[in-house]
Amino acid sequence: MTFKRTTVTTALPYANGPVHIGHLAGVYVPADIYVRYLRLKGDDVIFIGGSDEHGVPITIKARNEGVTPQDIVDRYHYLIKKSFEDFGIWFDIYSRTTSQIHRETASDFFRTLYEKGGFIEKTSEQYYDEEVKQFLADRYITGTCPHCKNEHAYGDQCEACGTSLSPTDLINPKSALSGSTPVRRETKHWYLPLDNYEAFLRQWILEGHKEWKSNVYGQCKSWLDMGLQPRAVSRDLDWGIPVPVEGAEGKVLYVWFDAPIGYISNTKELLPDSWEIWWKDKDTRIIHFIGKDNIVFHCIVFPAMLKAHGGYQLPDNVPANEFLNLEGDKISTSRNWAVWLHEYLEDFPGKQDVLRYVLTANAPETKDNDFTWKDFQARNNNELVAILGNFVHRAMVLTHKYFDGKVPPCGELTDYDNRTVDEFIDIKKDLEKNLDQFRFRDALKDAMSLARIGNKYLADTEPWKSAKTDMPRVATILNLSMQIVANLGIAFEPFLPFSAAKIRDFVGLDSCIWADLGKITILTKGQMLKTPELLFEKIEDETVHAQVQKLLDTKKANELKEMKAAPQKPDVSFEDFVKLDVRVGTVSECVKVPQTDKLLQLTINDGINKRTIVSGIAQHFTPESLIGKQVCFIANLEPRKLKGIESQGMILSAETPDGKLVLIHPGEKVPDGSAVK
């Protein structure tokens, strides 16, 4: 079917933290590539984005920081918006779900369904905190996971093992607000009866959209095969859009219900007089770009909402991506295991396109994929620098050298020249096909193949060898080379907008359209070129090592944070404790015990005599570092032989969470033999 216009939306990022490379790879770069491609073709398209600003995690963060939820969403909404703009992701509107127009739109949507009898009311038992006098959302309940025994699982998920949970699954549930044990109380909520739409959804998706990506189609089929159940659309919470009916005091619209309506309200805000044609006209195609965790909401729940409301077009495609991992580990905002966009630009200023390129080349289109800094470096150096940047720079330099920086005239093309042009056009067809089918990783390979053609053409024709004998041939070669450069300024516009703009500026191309891609008459004879500049620069090993070390430091900090103190040993009587004779002594000699890795032999001046103590601390201290140090030791420990050496006491030390030993010693020098009280 042919459409007159396209509405493109992206998942609304949750405004309780900055955005990271996983967000960019999964949703926003693919959407931006597609929108730029449509615009180059001259299609009528709007690009809708915004922040999701309701829900429990925001209230938890606000509570932990001692601020209001509005403070939290204000902070991150503007940070997220700027990050997108910095990476060339330019929405027609980037709004938010705390706007007045969204509140009105979501309320009206709910009321329409309510008045049509589109909900069922159901009373159920939920956990209630009697100390703070409120019902607890799933994230406000913690306890022991029944699967892995993690003692810090949430009421909706255990982040240790990844299992989805219900609050009633938890062992020893506690309120995250007061620490008390919650009780169960009855509460009334409104539910969307998804089971009523199961037959429609099965026909619409499984029969009508077999062209959808396999990961999307497969997840939808799995949900439909399991059978759909009614889903609550309201919550007991004080942060969100109030449920707009009588008897709903203290209840708000569930965030999954109000968030997708944000696409509609943001369009209303952008186009108050014409928004309906972008959502209700049969000639409009709607495309949702999302991550795999949102497939069910956008393919099953939101379409059921739209169907229940009536009058809206359903999405034509939902090209969801899977997840991007980081250095072999799942990206986690809570563990700070991420590459944050605003921090990336601090470390790599002006290199937005490098990250866009790497994330597209490694896009998790049908399965999870992994980002590594080593691959980031390799793709920059071996592809952007050595292929694309190299060809553009060589063609520019040669044209400046032989024709004073002006596009030379084009003579008669040879068979090889024509084959090169034909190959270029063939790859354009593949590029278009992949872009149309949301295969952006393959499309990027096609674009880079165009640059490879240019490199091969220069290498094969060797214009520098003909410069002394056949300048007309040199002119033709460099004319065609510069036409390829101009073509690259079009082909890479969807993927690398900053670099593509530079290329077009190099050759004096003020604007571009997709229809010109493949033509060899884009530049006119005598057109002045800019002075050659490098498009990309190599990324050195030390730069990458610094990023890897940054992540290793994060992992170490997380490990320390998660470590627990050793459990307390059984109580001892005071009489047993006072039997210990703990004293201070000075280490006068210290050597490693032969044929051991852990043992040191220390000679201690104890104020009366010298004594020998053998201690397993060799992996933490060198012998020379201990000589002259005062230490605390147990003086009346029964002697025992270690490796044939009689040890007459025990050195005291403290072990830090990361396993490091610190010797116990007096805060200032005291006489040897002083008792520790």
Image (cartoon, rainbow, N blue to C red):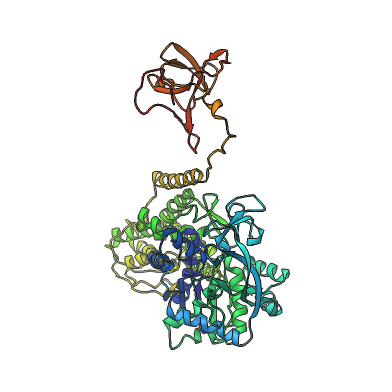
Q: Between 612 and 338, which is closer to the camera in this rendering?
A: 612
- Asked if residue 45 can be seen in this view, the reply is no
Furthest residue in direction left, as rendered: 404
**Is residue 17 in view from this perspective?**
yes
> For residue 274, which quarter of the picture?
bottom left
Report x, y in % for residue 154. 58, 58
Is 5 rendered above or below residue 18? below
Give the image location of residue 445, x and y in percent: 51, 61
Q: Is residue 344 left or right of residue 641?
A: left
Q: Which residue: 50% across, 63% down?
A: 57
Q: Position of residue 106 (x, y in %)?
A: 51, 80
Quadrant of the rendering where the N terminus is positioned: bottom right
Q: Is residue 536 left or right of residue 129?
A: left
Count the numbered circles shown: 0
Give above or below for 240 relative to 153: below
Q: Quadrant of the C terminus?
A: top left
User: Seen in the image, is 229 located left or right of residue 665?
Assistant: right
Q: Residue at x 36, y 65 (%)?
A: 503
Quadrant housing residue 209: bottom right
Closest to the observer, 437 or 563: 563
Residue 347 vertical placement versus 475 (above, below): above
As drawn, the residue found furthest toward the front would be 575
Which residue is at 56% across, 61% downward? 139
Q: Quick one: 72 or 353, which is closer to the camera?
A: 72
Give the quadrant of residue 411: bottom left
- Tell me residue 477's x, y (percent): 39, 63
Q: Nearer the viewer, residue 362 or 615?
A: 615
Most extreme residue toward the top is 609
